[in-house]
Amino acid sequence: QEFKFIQSTILLYVKSPMAKATTANGNGPSNGHGKSPKPALWKIWWTAARPHTLTASLSPVIVGHCVTVNALGPDDVDIPDLRMVTFQWACFCMLIQLGTNLHNDYADFVKGADDDKRVGQARATQKGWLTPHQTASAACTMMGLTFLVGLSFILQIQGPQWRTVMFTIVVLTSVFNGFAYTGGPFPLGYIGLGDVSIAYSGLGDLFVFLYFGLVATLSVPFLYIACKTDGTDDLLTSIIISALPQAVQVACLGTTIIIVNNLRDRHTDVRANKLTMAVRFGATASRMEYALMLVIAFGIQLVRFGRSTDSLVRLMPLLCLVKARTELQAVHSKDGAALNLHVGGAAKVQFLFCLLLGSSLLWES
């Protein structure tokens, strides 16, 4: 059942408008003017949500679900319980991404990174479609909902106290980092941390790798064992270790999204003193980093196949290699607004890879 669901999801995603990462309906580059004709309200919020990259919060959850089934075996997994954990965790990850995106929309505008010369996808605050107060308030709402979902998990955790402490840290740092990713005067300024910014310090790539990669993927098996079973610490540790290679794959491909984003925006970022990796080390280094992330993600899969050449199913994720190669060529040959499509393109590669990886894990189990 799990395999058939992922199979149908692949087909739906390939055919869906989200897969096309278009620049239509207000998602195109800035027209060089601060304000522009105001679209319908739902389109404004849809644009602010950045749908072309929202799959970045779902990809690790899919892999985390499938790696749990693979590690424990389908006969030893309570599928309804696992599905409930997966759904709740998907809500947490989606909400934290929405909150981070909305706060970035607000903070990049007030800090001057999103100005009239912006070349990336439209930003609702910069366009004048929403006020800074509206986007900041929406971000706080999303973060508040994120905390409530995280709290529901904390209250369900069983077993040794360290599990509760560890996941509480995950929840609190996730919410804090969502605000601190861009920083800005609200709300961190109220506690004297208005100058703290992950992205402006050049740590955005690391943040995505850790939280939208490792943490988002490994939390599914952790929460299933900690909330729904009486599994021992040894079992929990062994599953986390066995899932680590897949989490690294997800993390690498998730990082490519922010690499393309920062490569595209480096000229406006430098004027706002936003010292991303692309600003610090230049376009060539960013393009090399992008290629390295792809090599690691696909390389791990080849190593896994090499350890069990009888399991051809482990080659399934390589079916999106052609798409990954196309995106790599585009990133190496294009610049500025021409990279808009390829921010979503990187997200599409990650999502398809994760669907195929999840399918292979289920098939193996």
Image (cartoon, rainbow, N blue to C red):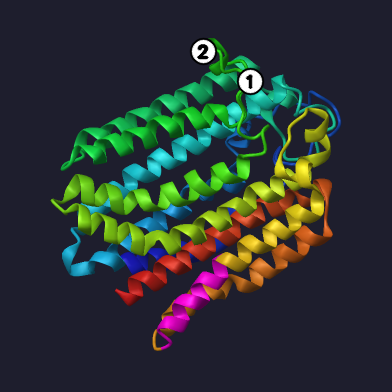
The segment highlighted magenta reads 297-309
| Residue at point 56%, 18% (across, down) | 193
Residue beneath disc 2: 191
Residue type at the position of mark 1: Asp
Q: Is residue 16 visible?
A: no
Q: Is residue 29 above or below residue 83?
A: above
Quadrant of the rendering where the C terminus is positioned: bottom left
Compared with residue 154, is residue 58 higher up or lower down, i.e. above or below? below
Mark 1 falls on what kind of element?
A: loop
Residue placed under numbered mark 1 in the picture = 195
Percent coordinates x, y for residue 265 in the rendering: 77, 40
Q: Is residue 20 above or below residue 319?
A: above
Residue drawn at the location 18% of the way across and 58% of the way down: 78
On screen, residue 41 versus residue 66, left or right, reads: right
Tell me which corner region of the image, top left, top right, bottom left or bottom right, holds residue 121.
top right
For this orientation, the residue located farthest to the bottom is: 310
Q: Position of residue 3 (x, y in %)?
A: 35, 69
Determine which quarter of the picture holds residue 268.
top right
Q: Position of residue 205 (x, y in %)?
A: 61, 45
Q: Is residue 193 visible?
A: yes
Report the quarter where the N terminus lies: bottom left
Distance in Å between CA atoms under marks 1 and 2: 11 Å
Determine if the magenta segment contains residue 72.
Answer: no
Q: Report the residue at 55% width, 42% height from top.
A: 207
The three-letter code of the residue at mark 2 reads Ile
Which x, y percent locates residue 80? 21, 54
